[in-house]
Amino acid sequence: MNWTQIGILYRRELRSALRERTIVVNGILIPIFMYPIMLWAVFTGMTFVQGINDGFVSRLAVDGPPPAAHSMLLDTIRGHERIQVREDAADPSVWDAQLAAGELDAIVSFRPIDAGALDDNFAVAVLYDRAEERSRQARERVRRLVDDYRTDWIAGRAESLDVDEAERTVFVLVGENVSSSEDIGQLLLGQMLSFFLVIMVALGCFIPSVDTTAGERERSTWETLMTVSASRSSIVTAKYLYVVTLGMVAGLLNVVAMMISMGAIVRPLLQANDEAIAFSIPLMAAPVMLAGATALALFFGAAMMILAAFARSFKDGQAMVTPVYWLVFIPILLGDQTDVNLSLGTALIPIANITMMIRDAIQGVFLWQWIGLTLAVTMALVVACLLLARQILKFEDFLMGSFDGSFWRFAKEKLFA
Amino acid sequence: MTDMSQATVRVSDLRKTFYDESRGEVHAVDGLSFDCHPGEVFGLLGANGAGKTTTLRMLSTVLKPSGGTASVMGHDIERDPEAVRRSLGFYSASTALYPRLTARETIEFFTRINGYPAERVQQRVEELVDRFGIAEYQKGRVDKLSSGMKQKVSIARTMAHDPPVLIFDEPTVGLDVMNALAMVKVIRELKEEGKTIIFSSHIMSEVEKLCDRIGIVHRGKLLALGTLDELRAVTGEHYLEDVFLDYVKRAEGIVGEAEIGPAGALHAAGDELPDRSP
């Protein structure tokens, strides 16, 4: 291989790519701007919905008063500024229908309970529609009022019996969070960043791998390239390095954008809710993430190029690679959404292992032997892809665009025949 | 001036066999042999599907031969394909330009990738830009250029590394009259500069105007090889079209007014003629 020629071909690929809107959008702009826009949209949406829910007035029908000793509870419910007890809903036989029709948000009934020594005990039953946000909100408001009323009543009774607060507050559960604000931030970052980093590396490789193979055929520049004095291996190496570069760039831009977005958008919003979270990544996680992104880009680049190289048009190339892109989500979710750490077993699952490795590293967990195994497994896959690519390149009909533009047809005719 | 003393391109018993699902084994090129020399325009004349493009693709090392040998400037096409490609420029309707590069970037890329000395690349690019009148639009992206402009850039990129051998495979296909004439003019200039030119076409008038020697290809075989006058003398026909038809009919073993189909196949049978292969 001639590295001077590889350099010339590589620069040509990059120059062309950076002038292609689809590649720039998918490989650079989406990784940079997706998080700020997505996070802003999510938090704004949540705040908006919360505001709407808080503004709802819950419409209740009340079935019978509570025992006379507790009539104050009903007064409290009636007095709540966001609760309207529908006095016009006098006919209990139609309440269920009104609840189903959304004309009522909840039906509250007071039922006597025989509780031995305690006179006038009762239960508050709330009939509500869980499928409706307004109805759930009404139930929640009633629950809080009943809880507060119960607490006050117990305190009053305790006082009348001369039991002070220290005596009646026994057998309590005290929880203490040992996580620092950094730990919480790393937990969130680990889950989000590992997921999106893998997705973005795959997305970053997607369009360039199709463009540099099927796109060449479609533009009729494939044969032009075959007649330059560079060797076939130099041409393929340059194309491969170009795809890997854009995959890595997409992945790493994504990490930077995520860090900035979490710090600039999410942290202030959380601080406003008195939740102190610091978004930082352990220093040692940086090389692990870089190694993971590189290994993934090498793997995705090789696999996608092999499939797309058979296609005769960009569209066909996209059709060949798209299923692979979606299949990638399965191991990513497996790696990201479980609490299982990297281990001998999980390090053998491609893609899921890298996802876990990155997640663990961001959360400050470095299981070096399994990190090594993960990278070895991924690189073994890369080598397998490159060996397959070398076999494919030996077939001249592949270079001239045979096999109906399909890798599977090639595999059937040449590899498994 | 044609220097017949040394061959820049040597083709000996070159063969290419494909396997086609419906037709079985197809001998696209079946034992072609010819030499080309500096300052010569060698024409490969044949109907579509005759094997011209396959031959030229083997010469430019895009395809590997199934049999026989060929060399360009002494470099064997199988043993030293990179050196072969460094020694030739290949132009055809199927070798397009990179749409997202500018005209200048395109020429520079092909100059560099084909091994032109790095310190002289810019000077060479300037020469080509001047020669083909590309200066005005040299910074324009190829996909924004007219077909005539693209043709000039395409020729410039073909000869970017100043190769001694140039292959033009059906170079006027799809061009209007003015651009086709411009192409013919360029080929004549290159011949004057001493380049070896292999020119393939099915357009008789172009072959007649340009080529010093003509090889008539039919069903992958070379039916005839010689100057136009030599071919005329053998067939007794004046026009190249008639010369061509005469050879094809004889190859098919047909005499008379049989109709020839798109790939040179005869649609009606006639009397057999004695073999007159070169």
Image (spheres, helix red, strand yellow):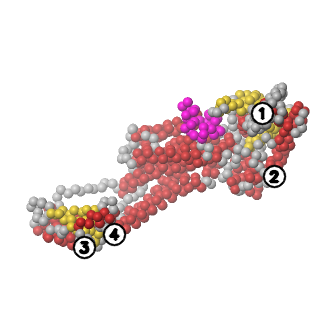
Q: How much space separates mark 1 and mark 3, taking CA atoms?
A: 102 Å
Disc 1 crowd rating (10 Å Cα; few below 14, some 14-19, many 20+) is few
Alpha carbons under labels 4 and 3: distance apart: 18 Å
Q: Secondary structure at mark 1?
A: loop
Q: Would you say the magenta stretch is mainly helix, strand or loop?
A: helix
The percent position of residue A154, horizontal first and vertical second, equals 16, 65
First to last magenta residue range: A392-417
As shown in the figure, which amino acid type bears the numbered disc 1? Ala
Instruction: Give the residue drawn at x 30%, y 55%.
Output: A177
Q: Which residue is mark 3?
A: A87
Task: Work out whether disc 4 and disc 3 sit on a shared chain.
Answer: yes
- SS for callout 4: loop
**Disc 1: which residue:** B268
- In the image shown, does B141 or A123 lie closer to the viewer? A123
Disc 2 residue type (three-letter)? Met
Q: In the image, is residue B1 above or below residue A89?
A: above
